[in-house]
Image (spheres, helix red, strand yellow):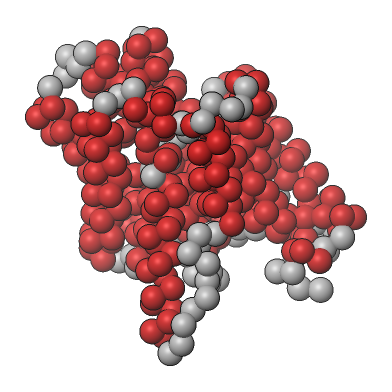
Amino acid sequence: MRPNSIYFWNLNSLIPGILISTLIAIAAQSISDHYGAPAMLMALLFGISLNFLSSDSKCELGITFSARTILRLGISLLGLRISISMISELGWSIIIVVMSSVIATIIFGLLVARIFNHGPKFAFLSSGSVAICGASAAIAISTILPHDERSEERLVFTVAGVTILSTIAMIFYPIFTHYMEYSPKNSGIFIGSTIHDVAQVIGAGFTISKETGDVAILVKLIRVAMLAPVIFVTTIIIRKINSVKQGHQNYQPLFPGFIVVFIILAIINSMGFLPHTLTSLAAKTSSWALLIAISAVGMKTQIKEVLNVGLPAISLLFTETIFIALFMIIALHFLY
């Protein structure tokens, strides 16, 4: 039976790989809780150290299932973090600026990638993760990009890179906002619109003040909400390219199923039907699903191949990070 035929796998063949991925996720979260290390990065590194398990016949199917299906579950549940009322509290001028920063960063990444000797796949993966929501965005974007022999390596490098950059930003951006004499609100806007991962946004924002933290989370949710339209537009472009190459109409769905669920859950949450306890549970489930998925992705990765990505890839991620920060510095200067 082919590993791609996930719908025909029986439960017994999945359990070993899922259990191992889950145990790695628990270990990573424990390290994060006790020592403050980024959970995603820990899960990735632990997974890479156990990559030999992905070729084990008992674990292979479950690891692949975790890296694909559980991953999609985690992304889908992100929709319950978003509601129109929460985002609209910021005002339309900020919403437009933050959305513009996402689009501009992705375009910038695609344009400068050639300078760093990288093609459009890594350019879009890296710029999308920097622009939207770090590791979660990288995972989501990787599911729609055409798969090749280096797909896992690009994803692992991007997740590790944006997580490290987010952690550095979490430390230094509060110092920077103090130096710039930003108000608590403006500090929240800057932090929420420039730091990649949600956890680090929360850490940096509440380091300054509760008001800054609250604003930073709302701004970050605008970026998370951009995930669906970015995936939609990218899927259309990929369909067009494939149709031209293959000489016939490509029937890849405009919206992957998990993005449809993401949108539906965001709409339901915006209507206010769901109790806070349920949305809180969904948020925790999403975090755990993504942690389990990235553990599995790590196990499917060869460290030598990741290291081959090299200095140009690091430079591209760093350049994209600087770009979105400069964009928001200029925007805040003209807005306030």
In front of the other: 33 or 310: 33
Height in image: 180 above or below 95? Answer: above
User: Is 206 situated left or right of 6 in this image?
Assistant: left
Q: Quadrant of residue 183?
A: top left
User: Is 12 situated left or right of 139 in this image?
Assistant: right
Q: Residue at x 51, y 31 (%)?
A: 271
Give the total number of marks visible in the rendering: 0
Residue 282 visible somewhere in the drawing: yes
Height in image: 57 above or below 250? Answer: above
- Image quarter where the N terminus lies is bottom right
Height in image: 226 above or below 247? Answer: above
In front of the other: 256 or 192: 256
Q: Where is residue 141 in the image (x, y as percent from the top left)?
A: 47, 55
Height in image: 171 above or below 301? Answer: above
Q: Residue at x 73, y 45 (%)?
A: 21
Furthest residue toward left: 334
Q: Position of residue 218 (x, y in %)?
A: 39, 26
Q: Residue at x 54, y 22 (%)?
A: 36
Q: Where is residue 72 in the image (x, y as percent from the top left)?
A: 61, 51
Q: Which residue is drawn at 43% across and 39% down?
A: 224
Residue 307 visible somewhere in the drawing: no
- Image quarter where the C terminus lies is top left
In front of the other: 270 or 146: 270
